[in-house]
Image (spheres, rainbow, N blue to C red):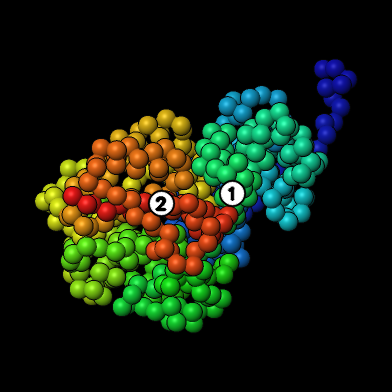
Amino acid sequence: MSEQSRRPSKPAKPYRRPQKDPVRILAFEALRAVDERDAYANLVLPPLLRKAREKGDFDARDAALATELVYGTLRRQGTYDAVIAACVDRPLREVDPPVLDVLGLGAHQLLGTRIPTHAAVSSSVELARVVLGDGRAKFVNAVLRKIAQDDIQGWIEKVAPPYDEDPEDHLAVVHSHPRWVVSALWDSLGGGRAGIEELLAADNERPEVTLVARPGRATTEELLRQDAAVPGRWSPYAVRLAEGGEPGAVEAVREGRAGVQDEGSQLVALALANAPLDGPDEKWLDGCAGPGGKAALLAALAAERGAALLASEKQPHRAGLVAKALAGNPGPYQVIAADGTRPPWRPGVFDRVLVDVPCTGLGALRRRPEARWRRRPEDLDNFATLQRGLLRTALDSVRVGGVVGYATCSPHLAETRAVVSDVLKQRPETELIDARPLLPGVPELGDGPDVQLWPHVHGTDAMYLALIRRTG
């Protein structure tokens, strides 16, 4: 035996069991669900938070932190990926997705929150030990220590292409949007491409929680009795909750007399309901009713006038959500599961028809930030045929003198004006109605006759609305 082999070895470091952090573990689980199952954070996170509260692991501050970590990481994913890529020695596609999720959570804590640097790094490394193991925890530690050497502005100067060389690529990194989305939104704004930075920044802001008092069932006065509740900006039925406001704590929401509904969505329903008609006003149709927000408001407005609403939704489970939203409505209504391009109802029987068509959802990136990374330009072609088919069916379904509302939660021109223009070219018996007067008090609605709302201008989702009257 050699002399060296007899030398006493260094004492082993005592084993330390990884400490479980329920907040960050929950945030990691939510991000994995978004990535692995193509889930949406706004659907995944609430049941996870509810389960944690029931187990006694969470209080309100824990829930707020978990929410910030999930949504902040998803909103700024593009920026953080660029930073992480500058700190690793391999392409990001070669880094395991769970590792990227932990790195994203760590990057957000370092660059997007006020969590102290040492706490952001140590908590992320501890999370990595629990969910990834010691080996990859060391990798996470090394990368995050590099990221911690600068702040967000310093990193942007390092990783974002110069604006003068490539404006779209620069804005894509700075504001964390895919380049094609930046380009499309810029085109949709028009007006010399003004306002693009404000719009992209607004997409990364946490949206307010907005409630709707369903007419005849609840009042805004009742909802305003909640703590930190303030009136809506534009809709007479809207009430906004300050940050931290919990809709489930509102009695009217629990009872279905009120609901959570973006103010832009409310304005679309109100504009259709108030559009001038020639003739009777007795039969209304919501041809793409899921999940039921606009249908519930339309049903309540119809009931006040003695009209009936038919709410149709292709997917049976979404039709169930519509039925739940309309339950308790005082007036006559019916909910059916039917394909809006092959409807079971007779043509020409409705006085008012709404089609809020399936789309890319680029107008609701504040609420569904992961959609920006999930959508691709080719999705526009996939939606195009369906959107045009639904609008044609809606025009067939309305009587002469009646009105159709074509709506979509996307400002992309291929999903808005292009659809309306293409369909109306083939329908000489139709005319566009100026929708702007039907949104009283709402500023900066453009040249009309259609309307495009914007997060950075109106504080709403980027809803689009065209109102069309059938003249023959």
- Percent from the top left, x then y, of residue 336? 19, 55
Closest to the camera, between mark 1 and mark 2, is 2
Given residues 267 and 210, the one toward you in this image is 267
Please state the total of marks drawn on the protein image: 2
Image-quadrant location for residue 228: bottom right
Given residues 277 and 176, the one toward you in this image is 277
Q: Earlier in the sequence, mark 1 or mark 2?
A: 1
Element type at marker 2?
A: loop
Circle on res. 231 = none
| Residue 426 to residue 68: above or below | above
* Amino acid type at image mark 2: Asp
Q: Residues within 10 Å of mark 2 (few under 14, many from 20)?
A: many
The residue pinned by badge 1 equals 199
Image-quadrant location for residue 306: bottom left
Element type at marker 1?
A: helix
Q: Decide if residue 375 is in sight here.
A: yes
- Percent from the top left, x then y, of residue 163? 71, 34
| Residue 7 to residue 194: above or below | above
**Farthest left residue in view:** 346
Q: Which residue is found at the position 20% from the left and 66% from the top?
A: 281
The residue pinned by badge 2 equals 450
Image-quadrant location for residue 146: top right
* Amino acid type at image mark 1: Leu
